[in-house]
Image (tube, helix red, strand yellow):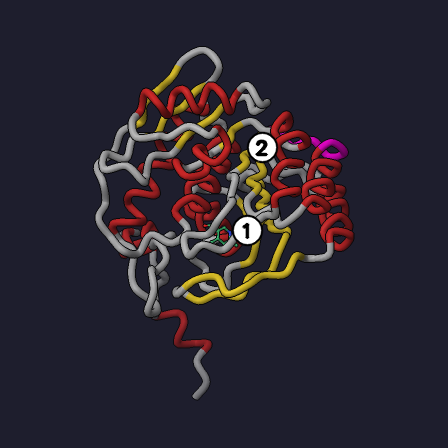
Amino acid sequence: MPLAATTPPIVLTIAGFDPTGGAGILADIKSIAANQGYGVACITAQTVQSTQGVKCWEVVDPKLLELQLDYLLTDLQPRAVKIGMLAGRATVDVIARQLERHPIPFVVLDPVLVSTSGARMVDEAGWKHAQQRLFPLVSVLTPNIPEAEALTGLQLTKPAEMEQAAARLRAMGPRNVIVTGGHLERPVDVLYDGEQFAALAADRVRTPHSHGTGCTFSAALATNLANGKHVHDAAVMAKAYVAAALKQAYPIGAGPGPLNHLYRLQDAPASRNVDPAPLAEFTTR
Ligand code: PXL
């Protein structure tokens, strides 16, 4: 069915479930909504975690994931997909097969390897398989510095080295690579599209509440691509969104809190808020 003119583009997230909402599917859905997409989600794994870290996780049965992806993608057509936690080899196979069966114009892969608290989010076999099976389907790969180091064996301390890593990663199949520099003192991201390198600079936001920054960035990027932005502009806008959400992040537990994904709702002028007067009709007496 054609979408109504007012329907935002559909953006699919295929990722793990983090019950704190800082990372994974919940963060993605908020990031997609905040950047004017309609988010739909298929879960790869259930994690047991609080703000204090990931305790353990279990993969969602890949057969169930395949049924869900096939059923959903037979019904509706996302403009973009963001892929996060991959769990293992069978899950990678399912995702690749479904993306071949139901092609989606923009595929963003955030190579989530290890959580900040140190838990592995994909096993070795799954990760090797992702490089062979998924990388060739990817429009934009978004590793952070530790992930790009793990994938290339390079040590990355400055933009020139990040460019080298981006070029090596692009040679593995993705059409574009963004090595995100949040771990640097000056958080420069490096984008490589196969022709040019671009350095996307920003000031460091100092906050302990940065859980899920990578998920949030990749979901915002996918949404901006779905909304017709070129990869460079999509990345700049996603970076600005993450910086603003970091500036307004808040503690919700004892550990690192989530970004404030929905700060734009709080920024909304009062005129956009619901007028409380007509609501009186619905209150019970
Ligand atoms: O930020 C990496 C990440 C991705 N996806 C899920 C996670 C985490 C980190 O904890 O839980 C589901």
Question: Observer-nearest residue: 74 or 1?
Answer: 74
Residue at the extreme bottom: 285
Q: Is residue 247 visible?
A: yes
What residue is shown at x 45% (from left), y 63% (from top)? 20
Q: CA distance from mark 2 to mark 1?
A: 20 Å
Q: Residues within 10 Å of mark 1 (few under 14, many from 20)?
A: many
At horizontal 57% and vertical 46% (from top left) the residue drawn is: 13
Relative to 207, residue 284 above or below: below
Say what amino acid the circle numbered 1 marks: Met
Question: In the image, is 215 to the left or to the right of 173?
Answer: left
Q: Secondary structure at mark 1?
A: loop
Left-right relation of 198 to 16: left
Segment tinted magenta in the rendering: 100-105
Majority secondary structure in the magenta region: loop
For the point 42% across and 47% down, which residue is it? Answer: 34
User: Residue 112 magenta-drawn?
Assistant: no
Residue in the foreground of this view, choosing between 242 and 88:
88
Q: Amino acid at mark 2?
A: Val
State whether label 2 is within 8 Å of ligand 1: no
Specify the quadrant of the image occupied by residue 94: top right
Residue shown at the point (26%, 53%) measured from the top left? 248
The picture places residue 180, in percent across and down from the top left corner, at 38, 34
Task: Write down the residue under mark 2.
Answer: 107
Is the shortest distance between ligand 1 and the CB of mark 1 under 8 Å?
yes
Q: Position of residue 107 (x, y in %)?
A: 58, 32
The dot on residue 262 is none
How many numbered marks appear?
2
Q: Is residue 262 visible?
A: no
Q: Position of residue 124 (x, y in %)?
A: 61, 43
Give the label on residue 121, or none.
Answer: 1
